[in-house]
Image (cartoon, grey):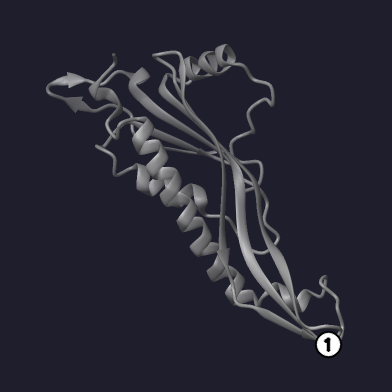
Amino acid sequence: MNHRVKTIILSSMLLVGGLAVRAQDSVIVNISPAACPYADSHLAERLEYKLSTLNHQPLAVNIQAAKPAKFENLEQVITRGKAQKARFLIDITVEKLDLIQKKITVVPLAVYRYQVYGIITGQLRIVDVAKRRVAKMDRFYWEMKGSDQWQLIDDEPTDPALKLPADEKISLFDALEEKAAVALFEDIKAATRGNHFDSQE
């Protein structure tokens, strides 16, 4: 799936009160993932499923999207949104999906405990193209704790054995990405009012 954009159109046109929803009433979500050395990322699929439940709104989710330009200004974002015929243009950039350790010395020079966490960091930006404004822009950080790992005598924090068993890594990242998807979904739902075409004011 590397370097491939998977575009899933859940609905291209809806009838609401007998009126066709225009193409520019759609929500476009661009997700730029980060490579994880321990597990495949399924954040985009999780978020796509949750967003598809919002009032059957026209929605396109671009998985493996290119990262937005670092210094892209609002006018450039709006131009990009209009080109994609979006009412709301949503860019989600995942910068890091990884494991970290927090070391605790239990017995000096003898026993060490490492708390292992899965973390995901990045940025969410929601632009209301029709109103020409940023509806929301935040950095995000979520973590999920795995089991503690112990080390006797040798103080070697780079020891691969301290990174959790393979099956636990998969479960940890699954739970972490579900947590992230729920939070992102709620942010998007609030910013687009859950039913983005009910008000153009």
Residue placed at 83% from the left, 83% from the top? Answer: 108
Residue placed at 69% from the left, 26% from the top? Answer: 70
Image position of 88 with respect to 45: above or below = above
Q: Quadrant of residue 60?
A: top left
- Left or right of 146 in this view: 149: right
Residue type indicated by callout 1: Ala
Residue placed at 61% from the left, 16% from the top? Answer: 73
Q: Which residue is mark 1?
A: 110
Question: How would you rate the neighbour count of disc 1 (Cα within 10 Å): few for under 14, some for 14-19, many for 20 or more?
Answer: few
- Left or right of 12 in this view: 171: right
Q: Secondary structure at mark 1?
A: loop
Residue in front for this viewpoint, 180 or 6? 180
Residue placed at 58% from the left, 75% from the top? Answer: 168
Q: Is residue 132 visible?
A: yes
Q: Quadrant of residue 55?
A: top left
Quarter placement of the C terminus: top left
**Residue located farthest toward the left when viewing the structure as drawn:** 17
- Left or right of 92 in this view: 72: right
- In x, y percent, where is residue 116? 66, 70
Give the mark count: 1
Q: Is residue 10 visible?
A: no
Q: Quadrant of residue 85?
A: top left
- In x, y percent, where is residue 42? 52, 54
Image position of 149 with respect to 57: above or below = below
Residue in front for this viewpoint, 110 or 135? 110
Image position of 30 with respect to 74: above or below = below
- In x, y percent, where is residue 200? 29, 16
Image position of 103 with respect to 111: above or below = above
Residue in front for this viewpoint, 50 or 190? 190
